[in-house]
Image (cartoon, grey):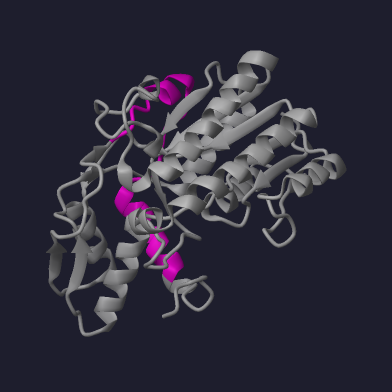
C-alpha cells in the first residue's frame, strides 16, 4: 500500500476514527482526509456525492455513526435506525458510484442475535431475533454489512466489514445519558470519589458478561484490513475474553481510587446476558489484540483526567 494513497476516514473526530487516523499517521500515511459533521453532513446524499466527486478518495474507512448505550438506544429508536442508515448508505453507495475499490465498514457486535451461541461467530448473523434494547442500531448496521457484501458479490470490489466488540479508550463519550457502560462507569466512580467516596449506583445485577477492546487495538485491525485483501466479507474484532459487569466495576473502582459502596439497581435492565466474540478468523489471518483490559482502562482514565475541561458533554 502506497503511503501517499488518499484515504478518507468518515468520523475522524470520533473515538474510533481518531484512533484510526493516529494509527495511519504512525505508519507513515500522509494523505489522510477528514471532514467534521459541520463541514459535511453525511446524512445528506447530495453533499456526500459532491464530496466524492471533488475529493476522489481511493480508500474509504467508515467510522461514522450515531452511537449510544442502552438508555439512548431505547429512548431514541428512530434516529438510531434512520440516521445510521442514511450515513452508511450515502457513504457506501457514493463510494461505489465514484469508483472506490476498497471500503472498510465498521459495525458492532450487536448485529448478532440475542440468544446466539457463545462465542459469537460471523455465520450467526441473521439466524435469530436481536436484543430489543438496541435492535434499531443493530438493524442499521446489518444493512451496512449486507450492502458491502452485495457490492463485493456483484462488482468484485474489496468492501469488507469489521465488527468490533465493546470499544473504549481515549476520546470516548463520557456523557452519562448517552455513553456506553465502561466510560459511564469511569465517570461515575471518578465523581463519587470526589464526592467523599459516595456510593455508586449501577444498572442491573452485575452478572452479564461483556468483552472489551481498547480502541487503539481496533485501529490496528483497521490498518491490517487496509493493507491486506481479506478473503471474506465479515470479520469479528475483539479480545476473545470477557468479564462480568461486576468485575468491570471493581476494576474501574480500583483504578479510579474510589473506596465507597457499589449498589446494584436490579430494577434496571441487564441487556444481553453474554456477548463474547469468536475472533479466530482475524487471528488466523495474522491479527490479534495487544492491550489488556486493566492497562487500557488506566490509559483511558489518565486521558480522561488530562482532558476533563475539554471533553464534550462531560460537564463536571
Q: Is residue 300 above or below residue 258?
A: above
When asked about the image quadrant of residue 159, the answer is: top right
In the displayed structure, 213 sits above or below 265; it is above
User: Relative to 272, is 232 on the left or the right?
Assistant: right
Q: Which residues are magenta?
A: 276-304
Q: 46 or 183, which lies in front?
A: 46
Residue 157 sits above or below residue 252 on the image: above
The residue located at (51%, 53%) in the rendering is 79
Q: Quadrant of the C terminus?
A: bottom left
Number of marks drawn? 0
Q: Is residue 291 magenta?
A: yes
Q: Residue furthest right?
A: 54
Residue 163 in view, yes or no: yes
Q: Where does residue 78 sit, x and y in percent of width and height?
A: 48, 51
Q: Which residue occupies the foreground of this view, 269 or 199?
A: 269
**Nearer to me, 189 or 82:** 82
- Give the image quarter of residue 92: top right
Quadrant into which the N terminus falls = top right
Q: Position of residue 75 (x, y in %)?
A: 38, 58
Q: Quadrant of residue 203?
A: bottom left
Q: Is residue 12 left or right of residue 236?
A: right
Q: In the rendering, at what x and y percent does residue 82 appear?
A: 54, 47
At a point 42% along the width and 21% down the height, the residue shown is 281
Q: Residue at image x 57%, y 49%? A: 83
Residue 14 belongs to the span the image colors magenta:
no
Residue 107 visible within the image: no
Side of 90 relative to 235 (left or right): right
Viewer-nearest residue: 133 or 213: 133
Amino acid at each position: 500500500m502506497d503511503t501517499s494513497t488518499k484515504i478518507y476516514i468518515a468520523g475522524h473526530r470520533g473515538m474510533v476514527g481518531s484512533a484510526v487516523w493516529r494509527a495511519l499517521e504512525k505508519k507513515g500515511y500522509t494523505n489522510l482526509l477528514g471532514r467534521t459533521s459541520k463541514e459535511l453532513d453525511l446524512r445528506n446524499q447530495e453533499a456526500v456525492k459532491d464530496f466524492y466527486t471533488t475529493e476522489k478518495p481511493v480508500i474509504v474507512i467508515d467510522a461514522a455513526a450515531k452511537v449510544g448505550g442502552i438508555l439512548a438506544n431505547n429512548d431514541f429508536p428512530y434516529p438510531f435506525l434512520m440516521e445510521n442508515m442514511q450515513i452508511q448508505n450515502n457513504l457506501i453507495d457514493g463510494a461505489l458510484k465514484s469508483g472506490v475499490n476498497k471500503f472498510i465498514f465498521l459495525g458492532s457486535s450487536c448485529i448478532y442475535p440475542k440468544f446466539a451461541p457463545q462465542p459469537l461467530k460471523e455465520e450467526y448473523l441473521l439466524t435469530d431475533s436481536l436484543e430489543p434494547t438496541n435492535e434499531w442500531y443493530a438493524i442499521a448496521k446489518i444493512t451496512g454489512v449486507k450492502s458491502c457484501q452485495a457490492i463485493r458479490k456483484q462488482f468484485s470490489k474489496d468492501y469488507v466489514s469489521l465488527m468490533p466488540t465493546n470499544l473504549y479508550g481515549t476520546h470516548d463519550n463520557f456523557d452519562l445519558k448517552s455513553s456506553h457502560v465502561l466510560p459511564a462507569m469511569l465517570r461515575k466512580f471518578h465523581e463519587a470519589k470526589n464526592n467523599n467516596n459516595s456510593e455508586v449506583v449501577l444498572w442491573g445485577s452485575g452478572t452479564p458478561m461483556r468483552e472489551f477492546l481498547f480502541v487503539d487495538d481496533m485501529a490496528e485491525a483497521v490498518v491490517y484490513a487496509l493493507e491486506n485483501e481479506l478473503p471474506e466479507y465479515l470479520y469479528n474484532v475483539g479480545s476473545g475474553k470477557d468479564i462480568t459487569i461486576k468485575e468491570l466495576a471493581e476494576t474501574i473502582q480500583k483504578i479510579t481510587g474510589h473506596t465507597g459502596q457499589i449498589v446494584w439497581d436490579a430494577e434496571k435492565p441487564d441487556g444481553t446476558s453474554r456477548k463474547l466474540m469468536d475472533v479466530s478468523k482475524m487471528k488466523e489471518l495474522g491479527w490479534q489484540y495487544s492491550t489488556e483490559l486493566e492497562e487500557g482502562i488506566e490509559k483511558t482514565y489518565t486521558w480522561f483526567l488530562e482532558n476533563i475541561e475539554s471533553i464534550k458533554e462531560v460537564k463536571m
